Amino acid sequence: MTSNGTESESLSPISVSTRRGSQSLTTLRANVRSSSGYESRRYGPTEGVGGFFDSFIVMIIVTLGIMLVTSSLSITNGELSKCNKGKSLDGVCRDLLDQILANDDLFVESGLLDFTMLKAVSSLPLSVEHGVLGYRIILTEVHPNTGPLTLAANGSIPFSLEELHTARVPVNVQHSAADVRAALISVWVW
Amino acid sequence: MAIFDALIFLAAASVVSASLLGAIAPSKPSDDAEVQGFVERAHSVFLRTTLQPDQLAGLGLDIEKNKTLTVFELIVSELVMAEKVNSPNRIDVVRSCLTTLLNGLLTPGLNYAWRAEHNSTILSVPSPTSPLDQPNGSTYVSKVASKMPLHDGDITMTLYTWRILE
């Protein structure tokens, strides 16, 4: 028997005073277990083991987001640099073609190349931008008995065709007054 | 709440990634003007080219020794001839010459159709791949018109080209 007249439980000799009266620890523990399902308030559903798993999922989602952004940034950067390099090499191709077409010594008249002067293309002082590894200037006549003719060459052709940039321009080539052929001057740059 | 925030972050990251990748996708350089220039130049080269005597053998043309015809002269003579005589074999020989030249100048990369008109007479070279192969996208047209030499009227030659889809 206690002082206020209630009977203490035999399992728990320690009693706790509350507004409603004194309760034993066993009763409090039983109340906590029934309301939350956990043994203790200290390791509740939002702060204990469950909170760790929540954070783990959050970390995965955030990592995915960061990876998504960084990978798209790197892809964009790679594509843009490739595009800029391609543009500059295409410009070199056109520049080389312009240098050939601007040389009046090679032409009998406008657009009509003198075949005997084509060998002079290899000795032309062609200016190529810094960073170009090599180039080829090739004449391909539309004629059954002739193949491609290399007019000028510099450097060795790369194994990968992706590195190769080309431009071509149609011209007439005069072998004689009665023999004017259609041809393409192609420039390869890498 | 933390998961909700993370999902919001993931959604924002997805939007940023999609816009970045979308921005580089249509960044292929537009070189329509360059192709147009190429086609016009190819057309003038085509008309200026001379044909070899063996190519003209089937036409029975009276050509002086050490002389030959340019494509333009051949077209003029064939249009005049076609107004008088209908000879499919002859037209086939001319078409074969013209097709060889146009193939050499424009392919690979471009497909084409070509035609010449004088009064109501038409000489045409269809697309070499298939008559059903129609332009799918930009068409680059080169038109050359001139007075018909030694005859009345004008002659108009038109080259239609378009990119071959890869």
Image: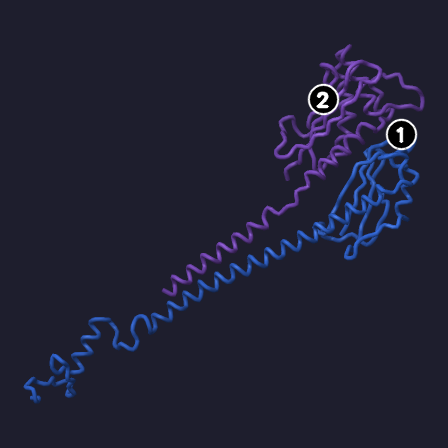
Chain colours: A blue, B purple
Q: SS for tag 2?
A: strand
Discs 1, 2 touching: Cβ within 8 Å: no
* Chain letter belonging to callout 2: B
Q: Is residue B166 left or right of residue A97?
A: left
* Residue density around tag 1, few if under 14, some if 14–19, many if 20 or more, within 10 Å: some
Question: Could you say which is closer to the camera, residue A123 or residue B55?
Answer: A123
Estimate the x, y position of residue A159 in percent, counting from the top left.
74, 53
Where, by quadrant of the figure, is residue B108 drawn? top right
Disc assigned to residue A179: 1
Residue for badge 2: B124
Where, by quadrant of the figure, is residue B10 drawn? bottom left
**Kind of residue sitting beneath label 1:** Asp
Q: SS for tag 1?
A: strand
**Kind of residue sitting beneath label 2:** Ser
Q: Which residue does the image show at 48% across and 55% down from the upper left?
A: B14
Estimate the x, y position of residue B135 in percent, counting from the top left.
63, 31
Question: Could you say which is closer to the camera, residue B126 or residue B143?
Answer: B143
Question: Could you say which is closer to the camera, residue A160 or residue A177?
Answer: A177
Q: Which residue does the image show at 52% across and 59% down from the upper left?
A: A69
Estimate the x, y position of residue A41 in percent, counting from the top left.
27, 76
